[in-house]
Amino acid sequence: MSRSGGGKGDGRDPGLTGRSFTAAQSFLLDVKLRWTHDMFPALRDRVAPYPDAVEGVAALLENDPDYRLFAWFERHLQRLKYSGRYGLYPYHAGQRDRLEASLSGEDLPAGMLTLSPDMDLPRYYTGTDIHQHPGGVWSDPIAGFVYERGARSTTPTLGAKHADLHTRFTDKVAADLNGAPATVFDMACGFGKSTMPFAATYPDADIVAMDLSEPCLRLGARTAHEAQRHNLRFVQRDATESGLPEDSQDLVTSTMFLHEMPPNWVEKALRESFRVLKPGGRMAHLDFYLLPDAFARFIHYGHGRRNNEPFMRPLAEMDLPAVLTEIGFTDIAIEPFEESPGALAAENRSWRFPWTTISATKPG
């Protein structure tokens, strides 16, 4: 599971310091903001009014120099962010010994972290370096640190406010519930960024945070322990086969989980949500789904290819209302989600993910 990595005296790039790393990452973010605020709306204007079908937009743009430059930046800004000389991976690899030691878990309360080091990981999960994260988020003990730092600029317009996205989602879910849940299941919690706002909002709830990635779970448990969020239990397991008792959860949630699986696994996740919910319990997933027009679909599908996310398009093309209805859910609500103030305003012409909340109730 371990990778070789730089440390003092073992070949670490002497030019890769905290200062140079921060400067380089800030530069890449500034370029990404130019891509977001200037290149994207200019490209959209070039094809307005655009065709009604993705294929029509593709015919107009696939060989267009401006689109190809836009696509190049999207691919390679992410590559440089993770794997360039001043990238996330080389920088954290240079601190490997210290980072790995911090994840020993020796001081965690009993039951806060449950690992399954011999579990077989799904092929869809290991077969692609999702997000262009070298080796994926599962193969290296320091992957959680790399992923956590990378997540700070996943949505470039949020900058330092990125955590607010998760708080806003938690607030929306809370507003839709009838009372505080006693039990919460966060599917695919990663390093706990999506889970922590629920733990803060519902300090008396028993919250299970599940993921496939041991490195992320170790970091999540450490972060939660440092924040004294001891109502959280981090568990390494496939969330589509959670092992939780039937009818045991008041709330099932996930963030950016569904688009990282093939459609048959998405359906498994939704069926598992239904199985573990108590009658009357609520499911709420935050993901990328509602795309308003063919241009948005073309750009989103291209992002999936360029960012090593092969299941973005299949999720967007699923008939989720039909799937949820067939499973047995009621009160189905699939709605655009405003990840930051003004994000859904008509005057906002910048690039953004098609954030969508997918919510439903188990009858009872």
Image (tube, rainbow, N blue to C red):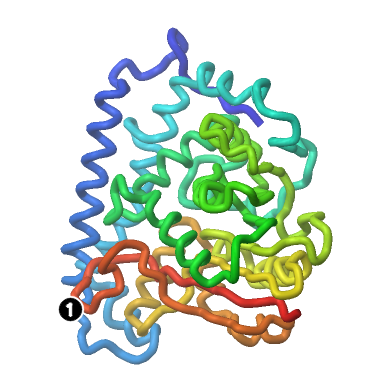
- The quadrant the C terminus occupies is bottom right
Note whether residue 139 is visible: no
- Which residue is painted at 77% across and 39% down in the image? 116
Q: Is residue 52 above or below residue 74?
A: below
Name the residue rendered at 35%, 84% in the picture.
Answer: 293
Q: Position of residue 42 (x, y in %)?
A: 16, 71
Q: For the residue marked with disc 1, what is the amino acid?
A: Asp
Q: Locate residue 267 relative to residue 156 in the image: left or right.
A: right
Q: Is residue 73 above or below residue 102?
A: below
Quadrant of the image for the N terminus? top right
Residue 253 vertical placement versus 78 (above, below): below
Q: Position of residue 110 (x, y in %)?
A: 74, 30
Frontmost residue, 44 versus 108: 108
User: In which image quadrant can residue 347 be found?
Assistant: bottom left
Read off the residue under disc 1: 45
Q: Residue furthest bottom?
A: 52
Tell which of 338 and 198 is nearer to you.
198
Helix, strand or loop under label 1: helix
Q: Quadrant of residue 319?
A: bottom right
